[in-house]
Image (cartoon, rainbow, N blue to C red):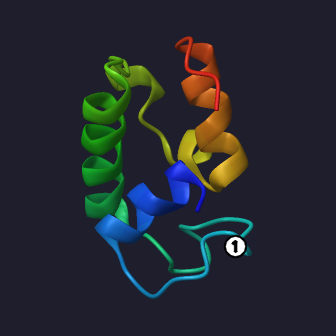
Amino acid sequence: MDDVIAILNEIRQGQDFAGAENFFEQGVLDSLDLTALVAALESRYDVFVDVDEIVADNFRNVASIKAILAKHGVIL
């Protein structure tokens, strides 16, 4: 299983993360989930996501999460 999807499933089980285009518009995640997601990503990949980067657009789907991680040097 994709590592990012595994993290997302730890935060909110039973969602179609792979098929969702925008987690927040589709109700797959909410703002509290975003906070948990950022904390989990920072912990798992030993990165720091600046507060200015913690916006829904940077975490709207699996591809955008991988892109923000790549920006911080994490290649998946």
Please state the horizontal and vertical placement of residue 42, each as a whole percent of the image.
31, 29
Snapshot quadrant of residue 21: bottom right
Q: Nearer the viewer, residue 3 or 58?
A: 3
| SS type, badge 1 | loop
Q: Is residue 44 above or below residue 48?
A: below
Left/right placement of residue 36 relative to residue 75 reads left
Residue labelled with disc 1: 20
Residue drawn at (35%, 75%) of the image: 12
Query: Where the N terminus falls, by quadrant?
Result: bottom right
- For mark 1, does the 10 Å Cα neighbourhood hold few (<14), some (14 to 19), or many (20 or more) residues? some
Q: Is residue 3 above or below residue 18?
A: above
Q: Amino acid at mark 1?
A: Ala
Residue drawn at (67%, 42%) of the image: 64
Query: Where the C terminus falls, by quadrant?
Result: top right
Q: Nearer the viewer, residue 54 or 5?
A: 5
Residue drawn at (34%, 50%) of the image: 37
Left/right placement of residue 5 relative to residue 49 reads right
Please state the horizontal and vertical placement of residue 36, each as a whole percent of the image.
25, 52
Q: Residue furthest front?
A: 1
- How many numbered markers are drawn? 1
Please state the horizontal and vertical placement of residue 46, each as a whole percent of the image.
31, 20
Residue drawn at (52%, 50%) of the image: 3
Q: Is residue 49 above or below residue 65?
A: above
